[in-house]
Amino acid sequence: MLDYYSIRRVNPYLGLLQVIDLGPVRAYCDDGQNWRVRRVFDMEVHWSQYNPGDKVSRQAVKEAIDRHPSLPFPRRDNYELWLLRKSDQRPLALLRSCVWPEEMEPVTDPRWIGFAGMYAGFTVEGLARGDDPRERLVQMIRWAAFPQPVVQWFQRHEDGSGTGLDGMRVEPALQGRHLPAEEFPPLLISEHWQDEEEAALARGFHDWYAATLLAHPDLSETLRSRLESAVLRNPVPLLESYRIIPGYIDKRRLDVAMVAARMIKNNTY
C-alpha cells in the first residue's frame, strides 16, 4: 500500500498536512520540506524506535518520500464534522475532518476553537471600538448554534455534495440527508450572516489565515485571488506554506508577501 494525500488540521486551524501513507507507517509534512515518520498505531513513537516487524523498511519509506508527486497532494479528508446553525440546521463551522470512516469518533465536545496559541494582531476593519475580534468571533459562532449545539458528520462526495451521518443531537430526519455543495462553507466557517459586521468578522478570520489556506488545492479562482490580496495581513506563515501552494492568480502579490514575511521574521519590518 502506498498513497499520497493531504488532510486539514482544524479546530483550531493549523494548516494543510501532507501525508505519505504506507499502511503501518505514515510520513507527515506541513511545510513541503521536512517529513516526520510515525507508526500508524502509535503516533508518538518516532521512526528511530520503529519495529521492522511491521514489514515496511526504512528504504521503502525513504524512496516514497524522495519520489513523491508534486505538492500539495489531493485532499482526502472527506469525512467532515460540522457544527450546525440552529436556525436552518446547515453547516456553520468545521470541527474535524478525517480520511477513514473508522476515524469518526463519537462527538463529546461541540465547541468551535478559532485560534491556536498567539493571535496578536488579528483585527477586523469596522468592528466596534473596544471589541476583541477573537472573542467576538467565538461568541458569534457559539450563539448561532445556541442553546444546544447540534454537530453532524458528513461524507463529502466528488461533486462537493454531502450525505449526513450521525453526530451529537442529530435528529433522525437529518441522518441520510443530501446537501448540495453550495450548502457547505468552502473554507472553515460560514461567511453568510445577516449582520454585515458579523459577515466581515467571518471574512476577516479567513483572511488572517490566508497564507495557509492558499495551500488548499480546491479553492475557486475568486477565493484564491481574495486570499492572495489578504495575505499581507499575516504573512509570516507563508514562509512555511509557500512550497505547497498549488498555483497563483497573481504571483507578484505572493512575492511581496514573502518579502514582508522575511522582514518580519528578521525583525526588520
Image (cartoon, helix red, strand yellow):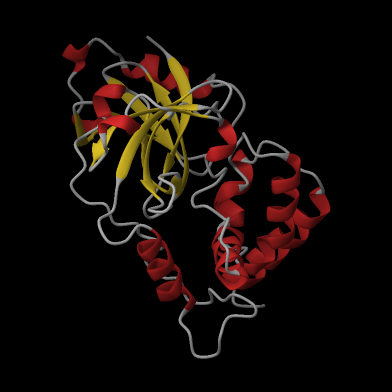
On screen, 131 above or below 177? below
| Residue at 54% across, 39% down | 183
- Position of the N terminus, as image quadrant, is top left
Q: Is residue 126 above or below residue 183?
A: below
Decide which of 122, 69 is in the foreground and name it.
122
Q: Is residue 116 visible?
A: no
Residue 251 position (above or below residue 146): above
Label count reads 0
Q: At 44% across and 44% down in the image, what residue appears?
A: 91
Say which residue appears at 75% left-offset and 50% top-offset.
225
Residue extending farthest to the bottom is: 130
Camera-side residue of 187 and 152:
152
Q: Residue 193 at x, y = what percent?
A: 56, 61
Residue at 57% from the left image edge and 43% from the top image edge: 186
Residue 192 visible from this viewpoint: yes
Question: Where residue 213 appears, x then y in whole percent?
Answer: 57, 48
The C terminus sits in image quarter: bottom right
Along the viewing direction, whichever of 61 and 29 lies nearer the viewer: 29
Residue 100 quadrant: top left
Along the horizontal axis of the image, is 24 left or right of 202? left
Vertical side of 117 occupied by 161: above or below: above
> Where is residue 152 drawn, in percent x and y?
32, 38
